[in-house]
Image: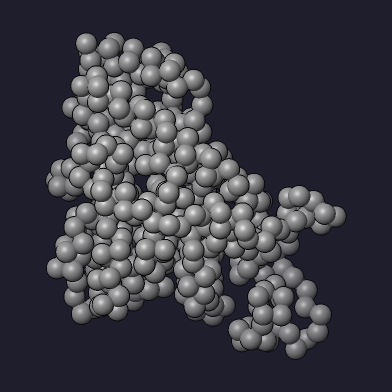
Amino acid sequence: MNNFHPEQALCETRREFGEHGGVTPSISRSSTFTVMDPETMPEIFGGIRGPEKGGCFLYSRHFNPTVDILARYLSVMEGTEFAVCTASGMSAISCTLLQLCKNGDHIVSSNTVYGGTHALLADLLPNWGINVTFVDPTRAEAFEDAARPETRVYYTETVGNPTLGVADIPALARSAQARGITLVVDNTFTPMVMSPAVMGADIVVYSMTKFINGASDLIAGAICARRSFIRQLMDLHTGRAMLLGPTMDPRAAFDIIQRIPHLAVRMREHGRRAMAIAEHLRTWGLTVTYPGFPDFPQHAQMRAMMNPGYGWGGMLTIDCGTQKKAEAVMDRLQNTERFGFMAVSLGYFDTLMSCSGSSTSSEIDENEQHAMGLSPGLVRLSVGLTGNLEERLNQLQRALQACGLIG
Ligand code: PLP
């Protein structure tokens, strides 16, 4: 196990207070900021002064005081020098890749990534001359085999969406470093549980829409990395985040700031309940995938990578065999048992269920879905925190019985 304690790191960092001594920070909603003397403005544009150099904010598409507080908390939680927040997870991913790659460059990516990311890599980036080879994320050698002289990036999710294969981050980091390649890791499924930068990843991206925010009421993303990379991204003249403009609203930043202090408690509880549900499903004879099972193929590897005390994450899958059966189970679970909601996304305090092949991974064609082990009857569960666990298990058992999946 790793010996990193993100919760402790957050407790030890400077807390930001609001004006008048508020225990919550103030929301700074200004789009633009005054400079006190005319010489300051060119210095900001020249990169000589900035929010951390002389206390000068310029314009909120660049840096904003409230958004910066959230970015600082994230960098502390991830063990990176710096971070920047974005308006969505997709913009965090796309700006990162466009900052790192230009026409003629190559990316080796996991084949088990969120459907939107897959579409960006497979369909959009090649239009700009950036080519991508997809490989099995659980085999670090596959990344090496696919690497070319023009490879700039290894891209993977820590725990792949939706089939939950775990990438060997330390091995990928070693291989990337030896070749001068940048390792970018999407840690959306496992904040707190794993800390890719502490294991050697260069850049950690998040959809904060999911577990980090935890309330399914906003869309947000983050890029955690070295200070020099964030500076490149935010360069006023050339930075991809500056030029493409996926700016986080300070009100969204404030909301997420309020939820960071209980992220650890939530992750532990998501993990505890997911483990209990996975174990029961297996006892009932269903095909369940959960990294917490000792016979899960990368169980030992994930154990070695995990931070102590946060469990195995809140995501599991059930293979119902066919799409029809999967839909019948989800229908029953939502509309009869009130167990959870048929909805895409994850990390909500209630349970969310989706049939991945026909929803969040539908951008990926049938053959590729098959190659990545994604069956048409696969139901992905993002296990929630609400309700009595015993009663949740009863609801699940009744629904599976009613649909004929168990006796
Ligand atoms: N990364 C992962 C693993 C996701 O599941 C998602 C969305 O579902 C994203 C990135 C994209 O995030 P957003 O919807 O915040 O743009």
Residue in front for this viewpoint, 360 or 315: 315
Q: Nearer the viewer, residue 44 or 143?
A: 143
- Residue 376 seen in this snapshot: yes
Q: Which residue is drawn at the image coordinates 49% and 30% (left, top)? A: 385
- Give the image location of residue 349, x and y in percent: 51, 33
Spot occupied by residue 394 in the image (x, y as percentages of width and height): 38, 14
Using residue 335 as the reference point, say whether residue 45 is left or right of it: right
In the picture provided, is 143 more to the left or to the right than 219? left
Residue 36, percent across and down?
81, 80
Residue 300 vertical position relative to residue 281 in the rendered view, above or below: below
Picture residue at 14% right of the left edge, 47% below the top: 371
Residue at the location (29% across, 41% down)? Answer: 291
Q: Position of residue 72 (x, y in %)?
A: 59, 63
For the residue pair 375 and 239, the one nearer the viewer reads as 375
Task: Name the residue at the bottom extreme.
Answer: 39
Which residue is situated farthest in the right direction here?
20
The residue located at (41%, 73%) in the rendering is 99
Q: Taking 111 as reference, is 242 above or below it?
A: below
Would you place residue 315 above or below residue 34 in this image?
Answer: above
The number of callouts visible is 0
Q: Can the viewer see residue 123? A: no
